[in-house]
Image (cartoon, rainbow, N blue to C red):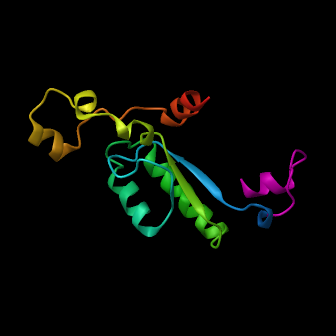
Amino acid sequence: MFDALCHSDRSTIHSINEIDAIGHRIVHGGNYFDSSVLITPDVIKKIESLCTLAPLHNPPALKCINVCERMAPDMPQVAVFDTSFFQSLPPSAYMYPLPYELCEKHQIRKYGAHGTSHRYIAQR
């Protein structure tokens, strides 16, 4: 990816040093994230803990974060969560009609999807 950014016939940059930060779209932020965040070891642990809620998406995203960390260790990385847009929903909108203890134990709720697109459209 870095090579394609810097050395293809369509490149607009010539060096990785011309990039100020790396952004990652993360599908599931659970109840942890209601906005984009700078990626830290704690953020990585929380994303890992949510892999059971998005097993096809969060693990590959974590691999990308790790690769970028190795390739550009001093570059800030930001996580943008698809579920963050919906964190402001009231419980009456996100809760399922199931026993509360079950929902808490298994993190069952309506999280929403494609929140980055919804946020963009709502702000336009």
Q: Is residue 62 above or below residue 75?
A: above
Q: Is residue 36 above or below residue 14?
A: above
Q: Residue at left 75%, top 60%?
A: 19
Question: Whole-percent x and y of residue 10?
Answer: 88, 44
Q: Which residues are magenta?
A: 1-15
> Residue 103: where, in percent of width, then height?
17, 39
Left or right of residue 17, residue 22 in this image: left
Is 89 placed left or right of 17 in the picture? left
Task: Tell me where residue 39 appears, x and y as whole percent.
Answer: 51, 62
Of residues 102 and 36, the one drawn nearer to the viewer in this rendering: 36
Seen from this angle, which residue lies furthest right? 9
Q: Does the magenta segment cover residue 14?
A: yes
Measured as percent of width and height from the top left, residue 88 is found at: 36, 38
Magenta span: predominant SS is loop
Point 41% across, 44% down: residue? 28
Image point (23%, 34%), residue name: 91
Residue furthest to the bottom in view is 74
Instruction: Name the residue located 20 percent from the left edge and 28 percent from the top edge.
Output: 96
Between residues 49 and 122, which one lies in front from this camera angle? 122
Q: Is residue 117 highlighted in magenta?
A: no
Q: Quadrant of the C terminus?
A: top right
Image vertical order of residue 50 relative to residue 115, above or below: below
Near-viewer residue (107 or 32): 32
Residue 69 falls in image quadrant: bottom right
75 versus 101 height, above or below: below
- In which quarter of the view is residue 95 placed? top left
